[in-house]
Amino acid sequence: ADLLQLLADLSSHVDSWPFLKPVTRAEAPDYHHVIKQAMDLGTMKYKLNSIKYKTAEDFVKDLQLIFTNCYTYNNDAADEYK
Protein backbone atom coordinates (compact mmCIF):
# COMPACT_ATOMS: atom_id res chain seq x y z
CA ALA A 1 0.00 0.00 0.00
CA ASP A 2 1.17 3.51 -0.67
CA LEU A 3 1.53 6.19 1.98
CA LEU A 4 -1.83 7.83 1.19
CA GLN A 5 -3.57 4.49 1.67
CA LEU A 6 -1.68 3.94 4.92
CA LEU A 7 -2.84 7.35 6.17
CA ALA A 8 -6.42 6.58 5.12
CA ASP A 9 -6.30 3.27 6.98
CA LEU A 10 -4.87 4.88 10.11
CA SER A 11 -7.38 7.74 9.97
CA SER A 12 -10.34 5.39 9.68
CA HIS A 13 -9.31 3.30 12.70
CA VAL A 14 -11.82 3.51 15.56
CA ASP A 15 -9.16 4.85 17.95
CA SER A 16 -7.67 7.46 15.62
CA TRP A 17 -10.00 10.33 16.61
CA PRO A 18 -7.52 12.15 18.90
CA PHE A 19 -4.93 12.22 16.11
CA LEU A 20 -6.98 13.38 13.12
CA LYS A 21 -6.42 17.13 13.53
CA PRO A 22 -4.10 19.46 15.42
CA VAL A 23 -4.62 19.79 19.16
CA THR A 24 -6.31 23.11 19.93
CA ARG A 25 -5.74 25.40 22.88
CA ALA A 26 -9.39 24.81 23.88
CA GLU A 27 -8.75 21.05 24.10
CA ALA A 28 -5.42 21.32 25.92
CA PRO A 29 -4.38 24.87 26.90
CA ASP A 30 -0.82 23.88 27.84
CA TYR A 31 -0.20 21.44 24.98
CA HIS A 32 2.04 23.73 22.96
CA HIS A 33 4.11 24.54 26.03
CA VAL A 34 4.80 20.84 26.57
CA ILE A 35 4.97 19.73 22.93
CA LYS A 36 7.33 21.78 20.79
CA GLN A 37 6.64 20.04 17.46
CA ALA A 38 3.00 19.03 17.16
CA MET A 39 1.89 16.54 14.50
CA ASP A 40 -1.39 14.91 13.49
CA LEU A 41 -2.72 12.71 10.70
CA GLY A 42 -4.45 15.61 8.94
CA THR A 43 -1.22 17.58 8.78
CA MET A 44 0.56 14.50 7.50
CA LYS A 45 -2.03 14.10 4.72
CA TYR A 46 -1.56 17.76 3.76
CA LYS A 47 2.23 17.33 3.72
CA LEU A 48 1.95 14.16 1.65
CA ASN A 49 -0.42 15.76 -0.88
CA SER A 50 1.82 18.84 -1.05
CA ILE A 51 4.90 16.70 -1.66
CA LYS A 52 6.58 17.97 1.51
CA TYR A 53 8.06 14.56 2.35
CA LYS A 54 11.39 13.96 0.60
CA THR A 55 11.61 10.33 1.73
CA ALA A 56 9.45 7.64 3.27
CA GLU A 57 11.65 7.97 6.35
CA ASP A 58 10.50 11.59 6.77
CA PHE A 59 6.91 10.35 6.70
CA VAL A 60 7.68 7.68 9.31
CA LYS A 61 9.39 10.26 11.54
CA ASP A 62 6.21 12.37 11.58
CA LEU A 63 4.10 9.30 12.33
CA GLN A 64 6.41 8.39 15.20
CA LEU A 65 6.21 12.00 16.41
CA ILE A 66 2.43 11.67 16.85
CA PHE A 67 2.91 8.75 19.22
CA THR A 68 5.89 10.30 20.99
CA ASN A 69 3.90 13.49 21.58
CA CYS A 70 0.96 11.49 22.90
CA TYR A 71 3.19 9.58 25.29
CA THR A 72 4.95 12.76 26.41
CA TYR A 73 1.81 14.82 27.01
CA ASN A 74 -0.58 12.21 28.42
CA ASN A 75 -0.34 9.95 31.39
CA ASP A 76 -1.07 6.23 31.54
CA ALA A 77 -4.75 6.79 32.36
CA ALA A 78 -5.49 8.94 29.31
CA ASP A 79 -7.62 7.32 26.59
CA GLU A 80 -5.24 8.60 23.91
CA TYR A 81 -2.36 6.70 25.48
CA LYS A 82 -4.08 3.31 25.49
Image (cartoon, helix red, strand yellow):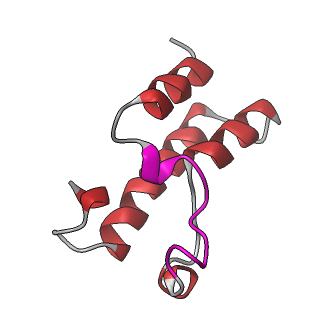
Q: How many labels does the image show?
A: 0
Magenta-drawn stretch contains 15: no
In the picture, which quadrant includes the C terminus? bottom left
* In the image: residue 29, left or right of residue 69: right
Q: Quadrant of residue 74?
A: bottom left
Q: Give the range drawn in magenta.
A: 17-28
Q: Position of residue 34 (x, y in %)?
A: 47, 84
Question: What residue sits 24% from the left and 66% below the top?
Answer: 78
Q: Where is residue 63 in the image (x, y as percent from the top left)?
A: 48, 46
The residue sitting at the right extreme is: 50
Q: Where is residue 15 in the image (x, y as percent from the top left)?
A: 34, 41
Q: Magenta part mainly helix, strand or loop?
A: loop
Question: What residue sits 17% from the left and 69% below the top?
Answer: 76
* In the image: residue 9, left or right of residue 75: right
* In the image: residue 57, left or right of residue 17: right
> In this view of the protein, which residue sits in the foreground, 16 or 58?
16
* In the image: residue 78, left or right of residue 60: left
Question: What residue sits 51% from the left and 87% below the top?
Answer: 30
Query: Is any atom of residue 53 visible in this view?
Result: no
Q: In which quarter of the image is residue 48?
A: top right
Question: What residue sits 61% from the left and 70% below the top?
Answer: 24
The residue sitting at the left extreme is: 77
Q: Is residue 33 above or below residue 72?
A: below
The residue sitting at the top extreme is: 1
Query: Is any atom of residue 16 visible in this view?
Result: yes
Q: Where is residue 54 in the image (x, y as percent from the top left)?
A: 72, 37
The residue sitting at the front extreme is: 26
Magenta-drawn stretch contains 24: yes
Q: Is residue 34 above or below residue 81?
A: below
